[in-house]
Amino acid sequence: MRATFSADVVREGSTRSVTGVLVVAKPDRYRFRLMLPFGVTVFDQVRDGKHTWTLTPLGAPSGAVDGRWLSNTFFAEALDPSHCQFGVERDGILDTTCGRRLYIRTSDATIAAEEFLTGDAQYDDERVVDQVLLPFRIQLTYRGGTSVRVTIDHYEVNPILAPQVFTPPPGAELVAPPSDR
């Protein structure tokens, strides 16, 4: 999958806008790049297997983007109902815990929201793209007050991806694999 998007990051009363691209090749590769206007890269993260590289060319802290959330979101294990606890249904949303807390729409079994260790995510404006239901708006809220509003501009499902898409950029640092993987 390839998605292009715009995002507004709100932190300590200040709003910054970026554009980006996310490329995911299951089972275990992704590239996530954030850019300022005119294409200046401010964050570039590549994962290939268990190895992750991060580049922040303008000196932003590499922890500014939650790479573990990205990894767990796109490479999460399939939900095993035998390991889930199902709570109360309200307004067509089923409260479910499967390692992380999920709110699942009963109408079509899609995830409406999730709570994870560092915050939560709300998914909205789902549309069908190549027979796959995908969110076009994502609201991320992190503990400590930072929030990110993401608007997806375009999705490609199963595009042909050149191998160099997943080549770490020059100067990227190898980061330790997440301890929970």
Image (tube, helix red, strand yellow):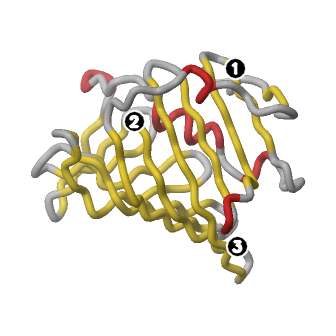
Residue that extends furthest to the bottom in the rendered view of this protein? 13
Nearer the camera: disc 1 or disc 3: 1
SS at badge 1: strand
Residue that extends furthest to the left in the rendered view of this protein? 107
Residue at (56, 40) in percent of width and height: 70
Query: Distance between the Cα atoms at labels 1 and 3?
Result: 29 Å
Q: Quadrant of residue 138?
A: bottom left
Residue at the disc numbered 3: 11
Query: Where is 130 relative to 134, above or below?
Result: above
Nearer the camera: disc 3 or disc 2: 2
Question: Sequence-wise, which precedes: disc 3 or disc 2?
Answer: 2
Q: Nearer the viewer, residue 114 or 156?
A: 156
Question: Sequence-wise, which precedes: disc 1 or disc 3?
Answer: 3
Residue at (65, 40) in percent of width and height: 67
x, y percent for residue 22: 52, 43
Query: Where is 179 relative to 71, above or below?
Result: above
Q: Specify the label residue 51 is tagged with.
A: 1
